[in-house]
Image (cartoon, rainbow, N blue to C red):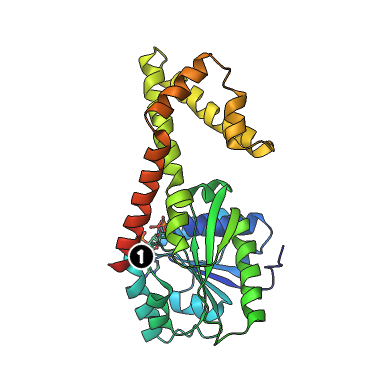
Amino acid sequence: MTDLNSLTFAFIGAGNMSGAILGGMVKGGVPANNIIATNRTVEKQKALNEKFGVVTHLSNLDAVNSADVVILGVKPQMMEATLNELVSSGADFSDKLVITVAAGLHVEKYTNIIGDVRFIRCMPNTPSLVGLGVSGLYVGTNPSTFNAEHIENDKKITSAMFDSVGISVWLDQESKIDDIAAVSGSGPAYFFLFMECMMEKAKQLGFSQEDANKIVMQTALGSAQMASKSDDSFEQLRINVTSPGGSTAEAIKTFQQQKLDKTVADALDAAVARAKEMSKL
Ligand SMILES: NC(=O)c1ccc[n+]([C@@H]2O[C@H](COP(=O)([O-])OP(=O)(O)OC[C@H]3O[C@@H](n4cnc5c(N)ncnc54)[C@H](OP(=O)(O)O)[C@@H]3O)[C@@H](O)[C@H]2O)c1
């Protein structure tokens, strides 16, 4: 793992997602006093200082100017105003690695404001909050401005940061950010929906809310954990619990007759299409 300890990081608009990432970095051994977090809500800033010991007394401008790596964590609709304010107050991004976690904004949107800088787009997901995130990463640095060695080093820094809250995957085209957003970005919601449906039916079968919740939760956790510890494919794992002619086989047949595979594929296509629409707004 790349040593992050010699770098200073500034999280601008440190909310839920940035809080998860900086928390993972601190737990992974990055000194808290090398991490600066800003938030326009003072209580949120204070909470990050109390929880992780990170530096929270600096303005956005001072945070950027003190950092080697700037992580932009504000909501997409706040990004333009935040960057314009920073640039007009004298922020200089030219020698920084800039990483954004905002959905839907293309690299060009940023570089039009902050200039041709070393830049990485990241699509994290909420399980980063519990150290089990998936982050899609895309290099937006212009290769004719910065050399390959610089870009490689930036990739190592970014992988080390996002691997501290889960796993990361490098993407070779910016459009793949929309694809990974549809799979892992939105993915937790799909699993929660499935869990919701199972819990409702468990209640109809007579289980209390508490028991239904517990049973479904542990089944999801156990299945994911089993899959992560096994060399078998998801398909093989499914076959392993589906005895021919048994009750699981009847349930699986119902899903297949009702074309669960097509429903899932259509849902992901709809998410990709919406991400593309939103990035044009
Ligand atoms: N959550 C996800 O599942 C997920 C997944 C992938 C990507 N993302 C991306 O992650 C980004 C952050 O999401 P989040 O869930 O962490 O949002 P969040 O908790 O609302 O964090 C953003 C924070 O930025 C603060 N802020 C806004 N403008 C600011 C400014 N000018 N200076 C300093 N702080 C400012 C906000 O303060 P206030 O409290 O005052 O509003 C807020 O606390 C978004 O761009 C989103 O697209 C999120």
Closer to the camera, 102 or 55? 102
Residue at image point 38% right, 55% down: 272
Q: Residue furthest left?
A: 281
Q: Amino acid at mark 1?
A: Pro
Q: Secondary structure at mark 1?
A: helix
Query: Where's residue 268, x and y in %?
Result: 39, 48
Taking the spot 35% from the left edge, 16% from the top edge, the residue there is 204
Q: Which quarter of the figure is the N terminus placed in?
A: bottom right
Q: Quadrant of ligand 1?
A: bottom left
Vertical comparison of 42 with 133: above or below: below
**Image coordinates for residue 94, horizontal then vertical, percent:** 52, 86
- Which residue is disc 1 drawn over? 76
* Residue 151 found in image quarter: bottom right
Residue that sits furthest to the top in the current view: 206
Q: Is residue 222 visible?
A: no
Q: Is mark 1 within 8 Å of ligand 1?
A: yes
Judge the density around disc 1: few (<14), some (14-19), many (≥20) Cα neighbours within 10 Å.
some
Residue at 42%, 33% (x, y): give it: 194
Foreground residue among 109 and 275: 275
Residue situated in front as seen by the camera: 28 or 236: 236
Q: Is residue 234 visible?
A: yes
